[in-house]
Each structure stands twice: as structure tokens, then as C-alpha cells.
């Protein structure tokens, strides 16, 4: 695919409340790829207020990744010698750097509460059916479907299952072969 950049993603079907005028009918008709996330532009039909919100599903996955990355760095630093005060500060700063973009996104979404879900139009249904053809976009849209909490805990469960899987293989090998 050469035109994957302008490929349309299925728009968000969320309906949100406008911060400016309290109108409860803010909808989005465009969703675009932004880095490793998707962004939906919500427009208020009443006052025209416009806001760009990133998707919650990927946000949850990335926040979980930030915790895991910081955890691994902390473990490597801790092994053998424990932490000094400076190292703890470095870790706190690292974690803030990793996690703050996701937290800022989450706060922005919370400021526009979801009031409902709309029906997709015929044209949008076609987009949902075909979906993006690019594998990275596919993966990102797939994560979007989870929502923040499921995305967040999903990654931990995935990693736990991964370790369990390899742990079991190791155990079987050691015991029977
Ligand atoms: Zn408004």
C-alpha cells in the first residue's frame, strides 16, 4: 500500500459532552493515525467547539508499558546493590516522562464525558468492515477496541501468560527430557 497515510480509519462512535456549552451531542467523523495512537476530532454541533482526543485503548496499553519499562530498569538497578536516593529520583523522573503523555490524554478524555454511542452511517459501516490494510494501523485499531482499563490490564495479563507459557515449557523439558 502506498496511500496508507491518508487511509480513513473507522471514526469513533462515542458521543461526548461539550465543555464549553454542556451540549451532550459532540460527535466525531474523522479519526487519524498519530504516532502509535489514533486521534479523533470531536466537534460540538451547538457552539462549534473542537477537541482532538486520542483513543483510550492504546493509552491503557502504553501506561502499562511505562510501568513495566520502569519496573525492569528499577530491577536491573536494584539487583546486587539496592537503591541510592539519586537512583530513586531518577526512576521517578523516568516514570513521569514515560507515563505523563498517557495521563494527560486520559485527563483530556475525562473532561469530555461520554454520553452515549451513535449508530454508524452506511458509509462508516463500510469502513468498519474493510478496516485499515496496514498491519500497524490494524494493531492500533485493535487496541483501541479495548478501552483504557482493559488495555492497561490486558498487557499485564498477556505478559503473565507469556511467562507462564515459557515457564511451563522449561518445566516440562527439565522434568521429562
Ligand atoms: Zn458546545
Image: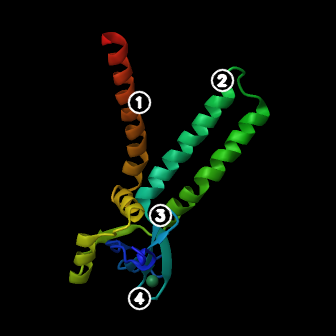
Tag 4 or tag 3, which sits nearer the N-term?
Answer: 3
Tag 1 or tag 3, which sits nearer the N-term?
Answer: 3
Q: Which quarter holds ligand 1?
A: bottom left
How far is the residue under mark 3 from the one under mark 1? 27 Å
Tag 2 or tag 3, which sits nearer the N-term?
Answer: 3
Please provide percent x and percent y for residue 114: 37, 67
The residue at the point 40 percent across, 50 percent down is 151
Residue 143 in the figure: left or right of residue 70: left
| Residue 79 circle label | 2
Image position of 49 with respect to 158: above or below: below
How far is the residue under mark 1 from the one under mark 4? 51 Å
Question: Badge 3, how many Cα within 10 Å: few under 14, some, many 20+?
Answer: many
Q: Secondary structure at mark 1?
A: helix
- The coloring applied to the image is rainbow
Image position of 104 with respect to 31: above or below: above
| Residue 163 circle label | 1
Of tags 3 and 1, which is closer to the observer? 1
Please provide percent x and percent y for residue 51: 50, 77
Is label 2 within 8 A of ligand 1 (CB to nearest ligand atom)?
Answer: no
State the residue position of label 3.
Answer: 37
The residue at the point 20 percent across, 82 percent down is 122
Among all residues in the image, which is located at the extreme left? 122
Question: Badge 2, how many Cα within 10 Å: few under 14, some, many 20+?
Answer: few
Is label 4 within 8 A of ligand 1 (CB to nearest ligand atom)?
Answer: yes
Q: Nearer the viewer, residue 82 or 105?
A: 82
Residue 16 in the figure: left or right of residue 122: right
Whether residue 20 is visible here, answered yes or no, is: no
Tag 2 or tag 1, which sits nearer the N-term?
Answer: 2
- State yes or no: discs 3 and 1 in contact (Cβ < 8 Å): no
In the figure, residue 57 lies in which quadrant?
A: bottom left
Question: Badge 1, how many Cα within 10 Å: few under 14, some, many 20+?
Answer: few
Amino acid at each position: 500500500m502506498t496511500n496508507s497515510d491518508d487511509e480513513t480509519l473507522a471514526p469513533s462512535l462515542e458521543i461526548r459532552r461539550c465543555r464549553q456549552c454542556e451540549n451532550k451531542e459532540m460527535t466525531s467523523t474523522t479519526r487519524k493515525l498519530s504516532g502509535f495512537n489514533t486521534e479523533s476530532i470531536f466537534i460540538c454541533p451547538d457552539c462549534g467547539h473542537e477537541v482532538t482526543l486520542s483513543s483510550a485503548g492504546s493509552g491503557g496499553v502504553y501506561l502499562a508499558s511505562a510501568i513495566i519499562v520502569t519496573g525492569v530498569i528499577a530491577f536491573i538497578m536494584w539487583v546486587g546493590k539496592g537503591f541510592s536516593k539519586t537512583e530513586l529520583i531518577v526512576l521517578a523522573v523516568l516514570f513521569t516522562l514515560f507515563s505523563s503523555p498517557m495521563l494527560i490524554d486520559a485527563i483530556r478524555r475525562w473532561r469530555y464525558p461520554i454520553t452515549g454511542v451513535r449508530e454508524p452511517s452506511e458509509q462508516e459501516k463500510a469502513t468498519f468492515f474493510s478496516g485499515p490494510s496496514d498491519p500497524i494501523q490494524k494493531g492500533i485499531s485493535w487496541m483501541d477496541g479495548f478501552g483504557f482499563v482493559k488495555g492497561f490490564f490486558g498487557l499485564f495479563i498477556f505478559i503473565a501468560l507469556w511467562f507462564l507459557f515459557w515457564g511451563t515449557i522449561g518445566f516440562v523439558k527439565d522434568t521429562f527430557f
